[in-house]
Image: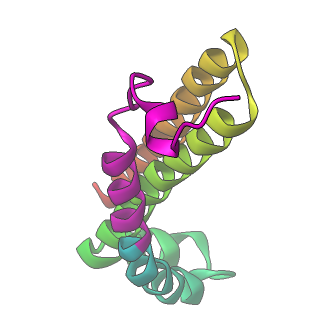
Amino acid sequence: MRYMTDRKRVIGLGSAKSGVHHFWAMKVSSVALVGLIPLFVFTFGPMLGRPYEEVIAYFAQPFPAIVAALTFVIGFRHFRDGVQVLIEDYVHGWAQKALIIAMICVSYGAAAVGLFAIARIAL
């Protein structure tokens, strides 16, 4: 029978060395989204149901375009980090790596499409 402390059992196992960075990235993006989501809702909401020309003219202004772009970028970054944590917790082996790569591509692709749409409208 072994009498080992918890510390003795984990010595030599190492660490992932990215937990603190990942934790802070999620917290910072969460705080940013707390302010951005209501701002996005209040800038995007009044345009629902309006004619096409009016919506284009509204989003051609800098403030609504910047709010929408920041919301897309930070929202999809937060999505990517959250899904990565879920995949790391519940999927193992080669499928874990494949799913993480796929979700990174999906999140960057969706953010790029959103930014392209905003740039197309604003410029």
- Which of the 4 image quarters holds residue 8? top left
Give the image location of residue 40, x and y in percent: 47, 79
Observer-nearest of 6 and 62: 6
Q: Residue at the location (58% across, 43% down)?
A: 85
- 21 magenta-colored: yes
The answer to whether 51 is drawn above or below residue 82 in the figure is: below
Q: Is residue 17 visible?
A: yes
- Which of the 4 image quarters holds residue 18? top left
The answer to whether 115 is drawn above or below residue 105 in the figure is: below
Q: Is residue 121 visible?
A: no
Observer-nearest of 45 and 36: 36
Q: Residue at the location (54% across, 83% down)?
A: 41
Residue lying furthest top = 94
Observer-nearest of 45 and 10: 10
Give the image location of residue 10, x and y in percent: 47, 33
Report the number of numbered marks. Answer: 0
The region drawn magenta spans: 1-30
Observer-nearest of 97 and 111: 97
Q: Residue at the location (29% across, 67% down)?
A: 66
The answer to whether 21 is drawn above or below residue 13 in the figure is: below
Give the image location of residue 100, x and y in percent: 58, 26
Residue lying furthest front = 1
Q: Residue at the location (64% across, 81% down)?
A: 48
The answer to whether 58 is drawn above or below residue 74 in the figure is: below
Name the side, left or right, on which 114 lies relative to 20: right
Query: Where's the C terminus, which quadrant?
Result: bottom left
Name the side, left or right, on which 44 lies relative to 122: right
- 40 magenta-colored: no
Give the image location of residue 25, x and y in percent: 35, 55
Query: Where's the N terminus, which quadrant?
Result: top right
